[in-house]
Image (tube, rainbow, N blue to C red):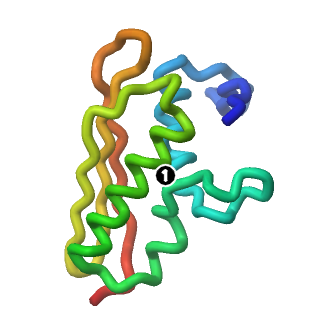
Amino acid sequence: MTSRQPWRLGPGRRLTLAGPLEHLDDLVKAVLLTGPQERLHQPGFGAGLGASVLFEPLSGELGSTVAARIQGSLADALGDRIQLVGVDVSVSESTIAAEVTYRPLPAGASRTVAFTLPGAGS
């Protein structure tokens, strides 16, 4: 995956640069929320935690499938930038939550990216 400059909209609606760690957080989120077949020249890119999961029945099997997709997708897309420490996916009656802990390479402190999405229910 080629990265672009980590531009952000800052105070006063001016463009500012994000720090390298915040940029890595954004890249992890992009991999997690992009679905397979969503990118034209990279059909295998993405864990598919976005729209494709929203319409699946929430179950323990879905949680383990999503966790496996997250691990594989992050290793493929960002394996040269991060070391994956852990992936925790929890499924409740109406939501699916994912928490990814990683360590920036070559050496860095662990960081966690977490978010919760609504689901279709069971």
Structural crowding at the residue carrying mark 1, measured as other residues with C-alpha within 10 Å and reported as few (<14), some (14–19) or many (≥20): many
Q: Is residue 76 left or right of residue 99?
A: right
Looking at numbered disc 1 in the image, what kind of residue is underneath it? Leu
Taking the spot 71% from the left edge, 24% from the top edge, the residue there is 5
Is residue 12 at all visible to an observer of this figure? no
Q: Is residue 88 left or right of residue 9?
A: left
**Camera-side residue of 54 and 106:** 106
Mark 1, residue position? 32
- Residue 85, percent from left and from top: 27, 33
Q: Is residue 93 left or right of residue 115?
A: left
Q: Quadrant of residue 94?
A: bottom left
Taking the spot 37% from the left edge, 63% from the top edge, the residue there is 66
- Residue 20, percent from left and from top: 53, 18
- Residue 112, percent from left and from top: 31, 35
Single out the residue that lies furthest toward the top: 107
Is residue 48 at all visible to an observer of this figure? yes
Q: Is residue 8 above or below residue 47?
A: above
Q: Is residue 56 above or below residue 11?
A: below
Single out the residue that lies furthest toward the right: 41
Q: Quadrant of the C terminus?
A: bottom left
